[in-house]
Image (cartoon, helix red, strand yellow):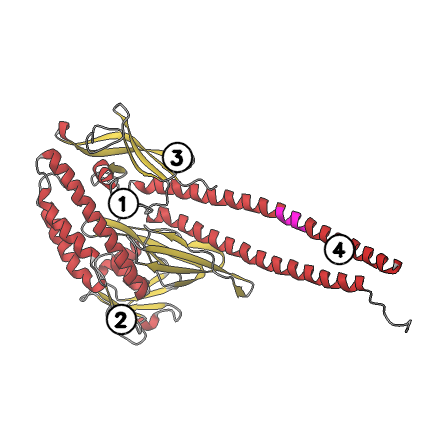
Amino acid sequence: MKKIKKGQTKIQEMAFVLIAIVIFFSMVALVYFSIRLSSLKGDAETQREQSTKEIIRKLSDIPEFSWADCSGCIDMDKVFVLKGKSSYNNFWALDYLAIEKIYPNRTKSECTNANYPECTTIILINKTGSYGSPTGAFVSLCGYYKEYGGIRCELGKIYASAKEIQ
Amino acid sequence: MNKRGVEFSFGWLFALVVGAVIIFLAIYAAIKFIGSEKSVQETESAKQLESILIPIETGTEEGKSTAPIIFPAETRVYNECNSEGNFGEQSIRVSTLFGKKWQEQGLPVVSYNKYIFSPDLMQSKEMYVFSKQFKMPFKAANILIMWSDKYCFENPSNEIEKEIEELKLNNVNITDDITTCDKKSRKVCFASESPMCDVVVNTRANSATWKGKQPVYYEGSLIYGAIFSEPEIYECQIKRLMKRASELALLYNSKSELIASESGGCSSDLQGELKSLAAAEMQINNSADLRNINLLAEELNEKQKAMTSCKIWGD
């Protein structure tokens, strides 16, 4: 009876040691994976940020945005009609994309059929609330203005942001 | 009891079994972990490659080439194209050589606004790429031509020869005699249909035929796509390009309606043709339909050229 008890204690001791080893290595693995995951998240965000900058840089050359008569200018009329096209959802890997007229000064208002072109902002993509801080770039915004009887270009800014990784 | 025998108590047996299980699990986890790490690396490489391609694609120039893309090790780039959906999908996967074994492909990096014309598998440490504008009649996209092998062009037209020189495509040689081509190069014949040719280009029919495959048809800058890209990839990218061009035609139509309402009808003459072009582009079956679509596009372009004001796209 005494011998059996001794054997049982040994087995229990060994089982505890083995469990402790497993728990220890699991914790080490957990720490390693959390560090690795955060660095992976960092890498992914850097890649996205880089892509966003590249997209902003090339946006004025994309056919859907480009103004025919000057390189680097954006066609506001095209952008305004593009706003209503659902087929372009997900076309650019962005979570936020907006174009804002900066000069001449106007009261800030989002462009609608009722106030276009006398408005300041066209928001093309606004998918989530957490898109990080948008990257901006200055551009010339050109379009047809009835009151000027023709084409006019104004100073504006493009804002774009890729999704913040949760 | 034999006292010289090895005593195997239950404790020992238990420790051995559990120890073996732990070691097995540890090895299994390590193998799985290394596998997923490699997959992450391959996916990162594909994403980096995609980022590198963005500035090459950018620009208002007719064509643009850059220095070769050099990978740290021998690399396979898989080009996949899917024409389903609003604009179709372009995905690239990467796999690198590790020792003597090719790693499993990473996850695909998908984009909707890129058009890579290339073989479905490119393998090298160096990849070559250049971009060309695709217009029909307005600019629809910048297409990317990518390849890894050496190319040898036999008797191309003066226009192509000049363009290759301007783009400084170093690993594309031009020759008058196909037998002088490097043995390992892909031979593209413009003036003959010798069995040595890997691709035969017929500039009268605007077609290119890969050895053992059906011909594909091109218009304008698409000739490079037809030469450098696998016919299946080419046909898929053409469908995607046409979907984009169709959406752009509808966009220009909406722009024309917007301007016309502000200016008392300016540019409204183009609206009918823009809608017809958009419909024809959306219904394309294969590259053989390109010629008819191009005729519609040329008519539309002529009509806009004749207009003195209210042009809605550039020349």
Q: Give coordinates of residue B153: x percent, y percent.
A: 30, 65
- Residue B280 horizontal side relative to residue B78, left or right: left
- Residue A145 horizontal side relative to residue B145, left or right: left
- Residue B226 horizontal side relative to residue B43, left or right: left
* Residue positioned 73% across, 54% down in the render: A18
Q: Which residues are magenta?
A: A25-30
Asked if disc 1 and disc 4 are in contact, CB closer than 8 Å, the reply is no
Q: Amino acid at mark 4?
A: Ala
Residue A86, label in figure: 1
Q: Amino acid at mark 2?
A: Gln
Query: Distance between the Cα atoms at labels 2 and 1?
Result: 36 Å
Residue at mark 1: chain:
A
Occupied quadrant, residue A100: top left
The outermost residue toward the bottom is: B195
- For marks 4 and 3, the one nearer the N-term is 4
Q: Give coordinates of residue B148: x percent, y percent.
A: 40, 61
Residue at mark 2: chain:
B
Query: Distance between the Cα atoms at labels 2 and 3?
Result: 48 Å
Q: Nearer the viewer, mark 2 or mark 4?
A: 4
Can residue A96 be seen?
A: yes
Rate crowding at label 1 as few (under 14), some (14 to 19) or many (20 or more) other CA atoms within 10 Å. Answer: few
